[in-house]
């Protein structure tokens, strides 16, 4: 892969990424926009791989393209296809009023100006010698951090406080969704082919999630990617119309939701009681503690992302089962 | 606990604390409310007595509290502040008694007496203010505490009158604040020092000082009801009688006049103000107000409106006194601060009595009221004559000194005609009322006879306050030369101001 | 090395602009959420481009961690936005 | 004392999880955690007052690598105000929410909001600020949409989208800073940053993002509907604290971290936006039909005053007068926090007791809720800036700064703004005087009226009379 072919690859990749972004945003049909966005996300994952960021590539594929795409598609499904088309079209075919066009040009100019200044500043930043104080500090302290994958070290040790707050953000989103009401109705029970696929796919996904969790310590992977994969398993089950998608009920569900932030806090506070500063893992214990936190975080992330897809507090198992049976009578 | 630092605070607190307690009293507990009011008033009177004695013997009372670096809340008792504090304390006691009688079975009395006490605390605080910053604080507090009093009745006119009052006074307050901040930036914290402190400022500041003076005087002029800014005063007549009595004789209007006296004497210094050529401007504004107020009063059939316009003109005598350079003019101005208070409060009490007892609101309805309510009408006559300037009532003393001061200061050419015309106009709008009250025989029936003529012509609490204040006005005129009389105290102030 | 960082950096700026334009112009709520996600992707590309040190050299891990956190935050915000939109449509449908 | 810093973040977060896991005793746990957090804030304030700026490295890594929490005079004061306001609002909320379902969904989100506020005020790292801003935005939106009514959900959605746009811009700025200077820690950044294209663009992006979240004038459209349709304790905290946290960041960036990068031209632009916010907000508040809209527009106006200080602080050379002006700014911010929270809580009582909050037919209500009306009056005094409120001292310094630096426009704007504020506050209070009979005892709904009264009194009396220590505390810089 000499330089020129790499350049060609980059050019191709970036053109298609920008093209997809443009197409997704310019399309008037929401469903088409979302699907283009998912493609955009996947190509983005390829770009991260190209820039030697495997952890981010995994996360982008699993969460950025995967779960966000699933959420968006579910949201598109909610609006009956007819309404989304009529909604978008009436003001399109009427001749756009002058003001609207001027506004569009104005906004485009504004965004172009923003891109220009951003590029101008970025070129200045990239032209100067790259600052290596932080990367060097990370590699120096990597041994003491208890893990060998630098990204996991930053996430779970050096900047663990960020990750704690980030899990709190996730929890807030789900609590916000809960506050808005009950979960949406499930999906039609799947046909035989899809059902067979699910029977194979879900265990594999769960196994991969476990592997990703374990490998995160010394290779790309970690709690987020594992959590996303586990959530993907749940989503597949949900799409297959299964009533039991692996989410516990009632109090157990609250425990799992709070597990991520809870374990993090527990570890931090006990360390505080032992006289160390908050989240300051003793080197001997570091890798074990990180694994403990990552496991809890994985469960929490999987549950919260799945609940976000389900769209609210799932009714108790009995209710969904009855709803499924009732739907089966109708469909027969 | 050094007594000197705490006395001024106690004087203010003696009406503030009862007021706050009254707010939270149940509507029904009348006796406790009346007790709290009277105890507060009497306690304040005692404390003020000690204050008078102390200040007379050159004793310094000052309490200081820093609100922010460079901004101190200072309560300092000097001769001028004690004069105003004594006036407001005495008249507050009298008005409290009157108000208890006046609001016999009216609603919202806890709220009324609560704000009533806050209003007096603000007035006393304003009087005792040691620097311009504290003065502005109490000046705004006064507006806040009097707004609910003016709007107390709750009728649409009351709320409208209160809104106009608020618009004028807070607008003025804003100008005063800007002027004070500007002065603070130029000259640092402006403490009130006898003889003023701005004389020493470099000359290139003078144009700014002129503009600041204008801002301050307009800000204060709103409350002192100088002509273009007096619009709120007649509108505020919708308030119940004790409120218009307190507002026009003691609190609000006097606060403006007192502020002008403070700014001219203790901030700029009267000689420096004259040097800047601002005194004549002030004098002209005062003169215009005096004449305009009296002329307008002529045409008012409503008794309280007539008294309101008379206040507009009378208060400007104080501003006129300040504008006359020289100790004698100053004495005239300052002593009128007290005399006008005593006389005007009597007039308002009597007007209240007429309205409350016989339902009389208009001058045309006052035929033969002297026979039905002799004592009240007698008090009314004493006060009215005093207003005209007929000796031996107090009004004559202040007009005499104003005239004398004008002659001494060589400003007689335009001050004397103003004094004479205004006295004639006073006579023109007061004497017909007296003639009508005493020499006309009453109509078939009084508009609305609420209180029947029992042992007294009206309820005791309504009758005695005007009589007491009328006697005070008479005494202030007769015993003007006695020690501790308003005139003596005004002379003491003038001597300390001019450093004689 | 210089060209890759600059190339990806400039593309990042273009994507941010595209996302912002979409977010400001679109009427339909869903596409405004997509636009905001696109803008986020642009910023993440900026960070990853800055982290790139060259074909053989190890990149700077800090921006990678930042982008990981950013992705999770973006998805939770998207989930809440879509839930709010669904509740809004549900309210509009039945009144 | 430094443990108080981590306590301020860990306590509400633990409380949030506890209320999530134990819904039945959620109220008791929430108010308990609130008390503990307020004690921690008090300890921190005491610590900063005695030992100067405090510093806490999380995970034991030095500031470059790990994240450092920092508390100086400014953040300690804002933290204390935040704790007092949220504690009072929590007591109010315990009586306000009757339906159990909303209540046990309310408490976890409420405590997460509190965590984000404390984390934001303590954070010393740019990316961490981004995460706290997100947490703040999401929890505020979730709480605003709690009512479930269509108006609330629509307003919350617009608030979320605007918030996300703002956060993305902020993140773009942070990325530029990391690209240019290789560090995210504010203390190190202050030493390293110098005027240049990177710093200007990054600051412009971050400031635009933050201005979206502070709802400064042209970008304020989302605030009134969101704050007016949210439940009372939520709109109290939204108006008093959430917008102010974003303002705190603009202040921290402009006057502390990027102090030598900021140009007077940019500061004047902020001042102009602030001035138009004052006039526009006050004008719209004057015409508002409903009390909550009036209070929301009043927030837009009051934030305008805070931005007026930027051109003053830039023009004043470092010295005593500049510290006085900075103290005035903080005093105005603190007083607005207490007064606005008190006002919204009082309006909530009126809305709950009388089913409406339209100003026109407020007559009967104001009479039989005397304590609530008194709270509105006190809060109004503080919002106008009349003595003895803290805002009077704040506005005094604003006027003094304007006179000192000869920038007369700000003086005029402040004067007009205050008079407009008088108009819209006393338009409401005018209804308090009517013929309706006066109830026998003044306080009718204790658990709801006392928090509103105490907050309003804090703004109108305590800060005005006992405000001197604020200036002393502000001398303690990072």
Image (tube, coloured by chain):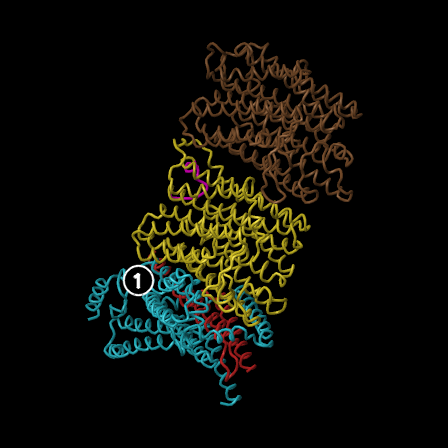
Image vertical order of residue D209 relative to residue B391, above or below: below
Prevailing secondary structure class for the magenta stretch in the rendered image:
loop
What secondary structure is found at the residue carrying circle 1?
helix
Q: Residue furthest bottom?
A: A2
| Position above or below: D185 against D325 | below
Residue A103: percent from the left, percent from the top?
A: 54, 65
Establish if B277 lies above or below D201.
Answer: above
Q: Is residue B470 left or right of residue D95?
A: right
Colour of chain D as rendered: yellow
Quadrant containing the C terminus of chain A is: bottom left
Query: Would you identify the image quadrant in which residue D141 lies?
Result: bottom left
Residue B38 in picture, x, y percent from top left: 49, 23
Q: Callout 1: residue from which chain?
A: A
Q: Residue at x 62, y 28 (%)?
A: B254
The question of residue D300 being in magenta is answered with no
Q: Nearer the viewer, residue A293 or C39?
A: A293
Q: How far across and down, in percent of the image, does residue D22 sit?
A: 30, 55
Foreground residue, D472 or D166?
A: D472
Residue B52: tell me if it is visible: yes
Shade of chain C as shown in the rendered figure: red
* Residue occupied by mark 1: A255
What is the letter of the cyan chain? A
Kindly indicate the quadrant of the structure image that contains residue B202: top right
Residue extending farthest to the right is B410
Q: Which chain is brown?
A: B
Magenta span of residues: D355-366
Residue D465 image point, x, y percent: 54, 40
Judged left or right of residue B365, residue B392 is right
* Residue in the foreground of this view, choosing between B71 and D58: D58
Circle 1 packing at 10 Å, graded few (<14), some (14-19), many (20+), is some
In the image, residue D397 above or below residue B431:
below
């Amino acid at each position: 892969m000499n330089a020129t072919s790499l350049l060609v690859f980059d050019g191709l990749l970036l053109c298609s990424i920008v093209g997809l972004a443009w197409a997704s945003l310019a399309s008037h049909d929401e469903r088409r926009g979302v699907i283009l966005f998912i493609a955009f996300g996947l190509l983005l994952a390829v770009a991260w791989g190209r820039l030697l960021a495997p952890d981010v590539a995994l996360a982008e594929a699993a969460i950025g393209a995967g779960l966000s795409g699933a959420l968006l598609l579910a949201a598109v499904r909610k609006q009956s296809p007819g309404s989304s088309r009529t909604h978008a079209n009436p003001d399109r075919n009427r001749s756009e009023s002058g003001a609207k066009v001027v506004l569009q040009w104005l906004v485009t100019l504004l965004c172009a100006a923003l891109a220009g200044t951003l590029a101008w500043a970025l070129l200045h930043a990239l032209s100067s010698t790259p600052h290596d104080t932080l990367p060097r500090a990370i590699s120096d302290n990597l041994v003491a951090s208890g893990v060998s994958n630098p990204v996991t070290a930053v996430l779970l040790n050096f900047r663990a406080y960020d990750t704690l707050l980030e899990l709190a953000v996730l929890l807030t989103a789900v609590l916000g969704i809960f506050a808005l009401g009950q979960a949406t109705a499930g999906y039609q029970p799947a046909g035989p082919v899809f059902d067979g696929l699910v029977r194979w796919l879900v265990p594999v996904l769960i196994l991969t999630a476990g592997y990703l969790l374990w490998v995160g310590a010394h290779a790309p992977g970690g709690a987020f990617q594992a959590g996303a994969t586990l959530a993907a398993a749940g989503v597949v089950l949900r799409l297959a119309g299964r009533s039991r998608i692996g989410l516990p009920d009632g109090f157990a569900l609250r425990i799992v939701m709070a597990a991520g932030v809870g374990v993090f806090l527990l570890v931090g506070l006990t360390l505080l009681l032992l006289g160390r500063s908050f989240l300051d893992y003793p080197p001997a214990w570091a890798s074990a503690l990180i694994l403990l936190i990552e496991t809890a975080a994985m469960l929490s992330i999987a549950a919260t992302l799945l609940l976000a897809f389900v769209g609210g507090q799932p009714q108790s198992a009995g209710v969904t089962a009855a709803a499924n049976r009732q739907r089966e009578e109708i469909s027969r | 606990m050094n007594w000197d630092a705490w006395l001024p605070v106690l004087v203010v607190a003696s009406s503030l604390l009862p007021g706050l307690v009254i707010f939270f009293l149940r509507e029904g507990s009348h006796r406790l409310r009346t007790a709290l009011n009277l105890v507060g008033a009497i306690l304040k009177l005692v404390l003020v007595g000690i204050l008078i004695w102390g200040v007379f013997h050159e004793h310094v009372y000052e309490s200081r509290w820093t609100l922010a670096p460079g901004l101190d809340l200072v309560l300092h008792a000097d001769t001028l502040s004690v004069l105003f504090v004594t006036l407001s304390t005495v008249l507050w006691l009298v008005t409290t008694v009157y108000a208890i009688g006046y609001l016999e079975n009216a609603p919202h009395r806890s709220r009324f007496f609560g704000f009533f006490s806050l209003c007096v605390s603000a007035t006393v605080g304003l009087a005792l203010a040691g620097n311009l910053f504290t003065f502005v604080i109490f000046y705004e507090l006064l507006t806040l505490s009097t707004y609910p009093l003016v709007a107390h009745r709750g009728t649409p006119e009351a709320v409208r009158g209160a809104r106009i009052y608020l618009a004028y006074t807070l607008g003025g307050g804003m100008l005063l604040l800007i002027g004070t901040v500007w002065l603070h930036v130029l000259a640092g914290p402006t403490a009130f020092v006898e003889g003023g402190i701005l004389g020493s400022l470099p000359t290139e500041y003078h144009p700014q000082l002129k503009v600041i003076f204008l801002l301050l005087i307009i800000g204060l002029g709103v409350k002192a009801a100088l002509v273009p800014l007096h619009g709120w005063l007649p509108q505020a007549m919708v308030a119940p009688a004790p409120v218009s009595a307190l507002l026009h004789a003691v609190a609000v209007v006097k606060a403006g006049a007192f502020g002008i006296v403070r700014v001219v004497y203790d901030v700029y210094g009267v000689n420096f103000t004259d040097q800047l050529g601002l005194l004549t401007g002030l004098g002209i504004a005062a003169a215009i107000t005096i004449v305009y107020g009296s002329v307008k009063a002529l045409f008012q059939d409503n008794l309280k409106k007539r008294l309101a316009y008379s206040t507009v003109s009378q208060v400007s005598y104080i501003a006129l006194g300040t504008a006359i350079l020289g100790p004698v003019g100053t004495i005239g101005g300052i002593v009128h601060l007290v005399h006008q208070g005593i006389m005007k409060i009597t007039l308002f009490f009597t007007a209240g009595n007429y309205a409350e007892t016989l339902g009389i609101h208009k001058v045309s309805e006052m035929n033969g009221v002297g026979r039905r309510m002799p004592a009240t009408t007698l008090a009314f006559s004493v006060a009215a004559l005093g207003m005209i300037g007929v000796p031996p009532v107090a009004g004559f003393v202040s007009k005499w000194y104003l005239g004398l001061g004008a002659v001494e200061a060589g400003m007689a050419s335009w001050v004397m005609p103003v004094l004479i015309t205004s006295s004639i106009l006073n006579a023109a709008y007061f004497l017909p009322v007296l003639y009508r009250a005493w020499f006309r025989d009453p109509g078939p029936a009084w508009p609305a006879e609420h209180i029947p003529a029992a042992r007294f012509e009206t309820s005791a609490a309504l009758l005695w306050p005007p009589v007491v204040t009328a006697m005070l006005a008479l005494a202030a005129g007769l015993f003007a030369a006695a020690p501790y009389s308003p005139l003596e105290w005004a002379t003491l102030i003038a001597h300390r101001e001019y450093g004689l | 090395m210089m060209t890759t960082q600059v190339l990806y950096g400039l593309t990042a700026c273009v994507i941010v602009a595209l996302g912002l334009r979409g977010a400001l112009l679109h009427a339909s709520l869903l596409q405004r959420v997509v636009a905001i996600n696109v803008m986020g992707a642009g910023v993440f590309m900026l960070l990853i481009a800055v982290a790139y040190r060259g074909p053989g050299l190890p990149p700077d891990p800090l921006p990678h961690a930042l982008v990981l956190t950013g992705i999770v935050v973006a998805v939770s915000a998207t989930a809440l936005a879509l839930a709010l939109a669904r509740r809004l449509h549900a309210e509009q449908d039945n009144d | 004392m430094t443990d108080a810093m981590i306590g301020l973040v860990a306590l509400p977060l633990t409380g949030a999880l506890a209320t999530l896991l134990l819904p039945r005793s959620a109220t008791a746990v929430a108010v308990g955690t609130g008390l503990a957090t307020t004690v921690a804030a008090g300890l921190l304030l005491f610590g900063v007052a005695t030992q100067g700026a405090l510093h806490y490295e999380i995970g034991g890594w030095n500031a470059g690598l790990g994240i450092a929490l920092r508390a100086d005079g400014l953040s300690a004061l804002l933290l204390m105000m935040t704790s007092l306001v949220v504690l009072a609002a929590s007591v109010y909320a315990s009586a306000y929410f009757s339906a159990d379902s909303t209540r046990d969904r309310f408490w976890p989100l409420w405590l997460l909001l509190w965590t984000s506020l404390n984390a934001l005020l303590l954070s010393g790292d740019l990316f961490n600020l981004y995460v706290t801003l997100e947490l703040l935005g999401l929890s505020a939106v979730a709480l605003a949409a709690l009512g479930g009514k269509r108006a609330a959900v629509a307003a919350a959605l617009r608030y979320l989208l605007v918030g996300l746009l703002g956060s993305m811009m902020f993140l773009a700025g942070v990325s530029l800073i990391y690209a240019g200077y290789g560090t995210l820690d504010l203390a190190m950044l202050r030493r390293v940053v110098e005027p240049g294209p990177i710093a200007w663009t990054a600051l412009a992006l971050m400031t635009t993002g933050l201005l979206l979240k502070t709802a400064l004038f042209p970008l304020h459209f989302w605030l009134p509907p969101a704050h007016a349709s949210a439940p009372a304790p939520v709109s109290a905290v939204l108006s008093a604290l959430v917008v102010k946290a974003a303002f705190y960041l603009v202040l921290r960036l402009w006057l502390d971290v990027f102090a030598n990068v900021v140009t007077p031209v940019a500061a004047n632009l902020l001042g102009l936006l602030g001035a138009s916010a004052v006039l526009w907000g006050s004008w719209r508040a004057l015409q508002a039909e409903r009390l909550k809209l009036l209070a929301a527009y009043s927030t837009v106006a009051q934030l305008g005053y805070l931005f007026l200080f930027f051109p003053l602080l830039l023009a004043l050379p470092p010295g005593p007068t500049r510290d006085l002006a900075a103290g005035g700014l903080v005093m105005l911010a603190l007083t607005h926090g207490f007064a606005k929270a008190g006002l919204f809580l009082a309006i909530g009582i009126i809305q709950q007791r009388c089913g409406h909050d339209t100003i026109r037919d407020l007559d009967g209500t104001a009479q039989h809720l005397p304590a609530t009306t008194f709270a509105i009056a006190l809060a109004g005094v503080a919002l106008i800036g009349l003595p003895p409120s803290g805002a009077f001292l704040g506005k005094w310094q604003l006027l003094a700064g304007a006179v000192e630096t000869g920038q007369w426009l700000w003086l005029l704007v402040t004067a007009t703004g205050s008079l407009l504020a008088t108009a819209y506050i006393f338009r409401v209070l005018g209804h308090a005087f009517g013929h309706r009979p006066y109830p026998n005892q003044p306080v009718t709904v204790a658990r709801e009226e006392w928090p509103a009264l105490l907050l309003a009194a804090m703004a109108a009396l305590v800060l005005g009379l006992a405000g001197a220590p604020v200036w002393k505390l502000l001398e303690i810089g990072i």
